[in-house]
């Protein structure tokens, strides 16, 4: 597996990974790509990729993109689900189904954090459903619950050192 910086050419793939992240639970009716992009609450995670302060990484294996993690800054006027402050970018991450459980998510998470540190970012936030298996990864990687984003989700933050 190879990790590289996400570029403008990856915008469509980041959207695919956002759709995968939105549809993480097999218990839910799947939301279409169109529906994800028409909903402002989700579309703003990828709209206009990349903005000047966006950071992202893409994982590739066997010549194919298999996952992506990216950080985007939001404002209090247009917050993400895991918004804590304008100076704390929010993490989005998605891994192609066939590659889940193989360390891709952890590698992407660490690479995104490294890029954030290099850019001078002091903390990263995210929102994760409590039943999502990725929640265990975030806890293991040092993210802490700072509040409830909704009845079923937590907002988490990692201080980058």
Image: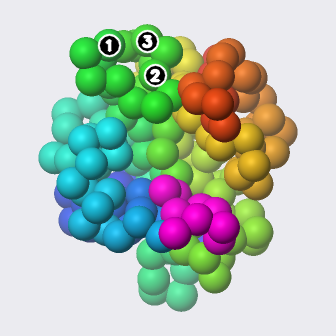
**Residues under labels 3 and 2: Cα distance?**
6 Å
> Quick one: label 1, few (<14), some, or many (20+) residues within 10 Å?
few
- On residue 85, which mark appears? 3
Disc 2 secondary structure class:
loop
* As drawn, 89 above or below 62: above
Q: Is residue 117 visible?
A: no
Q: Is residue 78 above or below residue 100?
A: above
**Colour pattern of the rendering:** rainbow
The image shows residue 64 at horizontal and vertical percentages of 45, 83
Question: Mark 2, residues whose alpha carbon is within 10 Å: few (<14), some, or many (≥20)?
Answer: many
Residue 150 visible, this angle:
yes
Q: Which residue is mark 2?
A: 83
> In the orientation shown, which residue stands out farthest toward the left?
48
**x%, y% of residue 15?**
33, 61
Q: Are marks 2 and 1 in contact (CB under 8 Å)?
A: yes
Residue 98, percent from left and from top: 63, 82
> Does label 3 or label 1 sit earlier along the sequence?
1
Residue at position x 72%, y 22% from top?
A: 145
Q: Which residues are magenta?
A: 21-29
Query: Which residue is at a point 65% across and 43% down the rendered structure image?
Result: 129
Give the residue number, with chain letter if any, for mark 1. 76
Majority secondary structure in the magenta region: loop
Question: Quadrant of the rendered structure where residue 97 is?
Answer: bottom right
Quarter of the image that includes the C terminus: top right
């Amino acid at each position: 597996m190879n990790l590289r910086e996400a570029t403008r050419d990856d915008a469509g793939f980041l959207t695919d990974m956002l759709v995968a992240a939105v549809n993480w639970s097999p218990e839910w009716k799947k939301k279409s790509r169109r529906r994800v992009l028409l909903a402002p609450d989700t579309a703003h995670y990828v709209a206009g990729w990349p903005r000047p302060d966006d950071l992202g990484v893409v994982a590739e294996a066997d010549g194919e993109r298999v996952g992506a993690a990216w950080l985007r800054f939001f404002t209090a006027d247009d917050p993400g689900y895991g918004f804590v402050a304008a100076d704390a970018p929010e993490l989005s991450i998605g891994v192609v189904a066939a590659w889940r459980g193989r360390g891709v998510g952890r590698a992407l998470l660490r690479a995104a954090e490294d890029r954030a540190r290099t850019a001078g970012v002091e903390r990263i936030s995210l929102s994760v459903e409590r039943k999502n298996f990725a929640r265990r990864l975030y806890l293991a990687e040092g993210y802490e619950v700072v509040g409830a984003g909704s009845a079923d989700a937590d907002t988490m933050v990692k201080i980058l050192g």
